[in-house]
Image (spheres, rainbow, N blue to C red):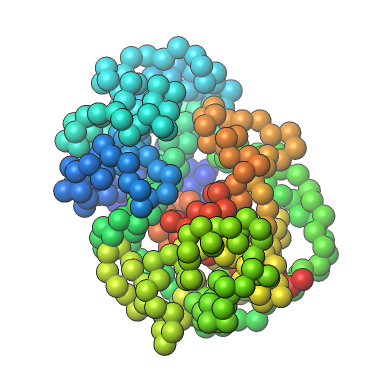
């Protein structure tokens, strides 16, 4: 494991990071990847983690494949990319240099190994994969030292960093699902109740402006009108969600969309995932241990259907993503809190008008129209990724990630 841990850097600063800060951050995120691998080394050696599909896990890559893919992604877009100095203008289909591992493309390239094939692959073992990650990082850091200082020259270094940061939260999700320990993660924080916040009708500059790094689905920046709205100051807590459960919320079709009610019937749910007890305190399974959590913590592991049903029961609604983004920026000084759970919004994930896909074509477009937007961050999200412009997205039935919600007045 690499002996480096970068200090927490605000996400906005990290998106504009120069060579020195990027170097530290790239070592830090690779160190986190190797930490996940080491912590789960025994589990990685068996079929549940390595070569066999896991029925209890919602769609995910084989973990050993996902670890190796991080080394491949970094090498493919940086060391092997002759057009890396062009940034987003680089042709994603341009000829690449050879990999330091002749088997890397056949094992870890998503084009050669689509999702439904990955579980049948036999990637290198964990030791070989770990060596590949160390070697690719060494090359990346050497190239970064000699790279230009403009946004184009640093684009792929920043892209690789944030790609790995996102995947590390996926590893946290997977550890939670399978009951594997993660002692280095912080615990979610409980907050005292706060009154909702009212925002007058206005316009909002939506999305990310040019300069520094931004994800393709955050662009182009544009102005949207926003009607007056009232929004919760923080995510819905276990106290609030337990009232819905105890009131028979999972047994009353009136509170559910047709797709949501079909999900309830199909899954047989009567409470959120990982919850053992809601009466007289919340008892949840967290990283393999039964933990009694404060009622003031944000409710989590909720599907979009559950968030929507709670809002219908409470006579409220989910915020749109533009409402969420405006409130996160303008409400920060008024007590708008976020960052404990990813927060579902009412918005279906779609491109902004004028969208231009980035070189990594597999990130956003396949999800347009079928996924819901989440905003914010979770307790397991790297500080570097906690940006109020970031658009997370999941299918509405997903509850394996650290997802919750807040509500707006009708």
Above/below status of 364 relative to 100: below
In this view, the residue in front, 178 or 353, is 178
Above/below status of 319 relative to 147: below
Q: Is residue 329 left or right of residue 178?
A: right
User: Could you tell me how many numbered marks the image carries?
Assistant: 0
Residue 271 in picture, x, y percent from top left: 47, 71
The residue positioned farthest toward the top in the image shown: 95
Residue 238 in picture, x, y percent from top left: 49, 77
User: Which residue is painted at 74% across and 51% down in the image?
Assistant: 205
Where, by quadrant of the figure, is residue 240 drawn?
A: bottom right
In this view, the residue in front, 277 or 129, is 277
In this view, the residue in front, 273 or 94, is 273
Where, by quadrant of the figure, is residue 228 drawn?
A: bottom right
In this view, the residue in front, 61 or 245, is 245
The answer to whether residue 118 is seen in the rendering is yes
Residue 83 in picture, x, y percent from top left: 49, 18
Above/below status of 34 relative to 354: below
Q: Quadrant of the N terminus?
A: top left
Where, by quadrant of the figure, is residue 68 drawn?
A: top left
Residue 28 in picture, x, y percent from top left: 32, 47
Q: Quadrant of the C terminus?
A: bottom right
User: Which residue is painted at 60% across and 34% down in the image?
Assistant: 365
Q: Is residue 353 left or right of residue 338?
A: right
Above/below status of 87 relative to 292: above
The answer to whether residue 154 is seen in the rendering is no
User: Which residue is painted at 19% across and 43% down in the image?
Assistant: 46
């Amino acid at each position: 494991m690499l002996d480096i841990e970068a200090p927490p850097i605000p996400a906005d600063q990290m998106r504009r990071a120069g060579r020195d800060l990027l170097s530290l951050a790239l070592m830090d995120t690779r160190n986190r990847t190797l930490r996940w691998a080491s912590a789960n080394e025994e589990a990685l050696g068996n079929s549940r983690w390595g070569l066999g599909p896991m029925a209890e896990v919602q769609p995910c890559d084989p973990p050993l494949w996902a670890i190796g893919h991080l080394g491949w992604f970094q090498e493919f877009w940086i060391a092997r990319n002759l057009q890396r100095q062009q940034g987003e203008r680089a042709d994603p289909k341009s000829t690449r240099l050879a990999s330091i591992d002749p088997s890397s493309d056949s094992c870890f390239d998503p084009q050669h190994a689509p999702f439904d094939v990955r579980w049948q692959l036999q990637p290198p073992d964990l030791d070989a994969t770990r060596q590949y990650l160390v070697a690719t990082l060494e090359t990346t850091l050497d190239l970064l030292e000699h790279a230009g200082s403009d946004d184009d020259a640093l684009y792929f270094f920043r892209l690789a960093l944030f790609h790995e940061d996102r995947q590390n939260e996926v590893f946290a999700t997977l550890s939670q699902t399978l009951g594997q320990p993660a002692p280095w993660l912080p615990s979610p924080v409980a907050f005292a109740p706060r009154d909702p916040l009212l925002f007058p009708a206005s316009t909002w500059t939506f999305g990310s402006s040019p300069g520094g790094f931004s994800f393709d689905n955050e662009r182009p920046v544009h102005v949207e009108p926003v009607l007056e709205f009232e929004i919760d100051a923080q995510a819905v807590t276990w106290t609030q969600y337990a009232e819905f459960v105890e009131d028979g919320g999972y047994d009353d079709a009136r509170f559910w969309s047709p797709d949501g009610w079909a999900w309830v019937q199909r899954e047989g749910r009567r409470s959120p995932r990982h919850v053992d007890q809601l009466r007289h305190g919340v008892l949840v399974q967290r990283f393999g241990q039964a933990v009694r959590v404060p009622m003031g913590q944000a409710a989590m592991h909720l599907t979009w259907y559950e968030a929507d049903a709670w809002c219908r029961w409470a006579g409220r609604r989910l915020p749109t993503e533009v409402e969420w983004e405006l409130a996160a920026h303008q409400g920060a000084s008024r007590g708008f809190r976020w960052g404990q759970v990813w927060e579902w919004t009412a918005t279906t994930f779609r491109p902004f008008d004028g969208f231009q896909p980035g070189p990594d074509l597999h990130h956003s477009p396949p999800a347009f129209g079928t996924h819901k937007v989440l905003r914010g961050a979770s307790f397991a999200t790297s500080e570097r990724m906690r940006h109020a412009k970031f658009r997370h997205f999941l299918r509405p039935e997903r509850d394996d990630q650290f997802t919750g919600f807040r509500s707006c007045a009708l």
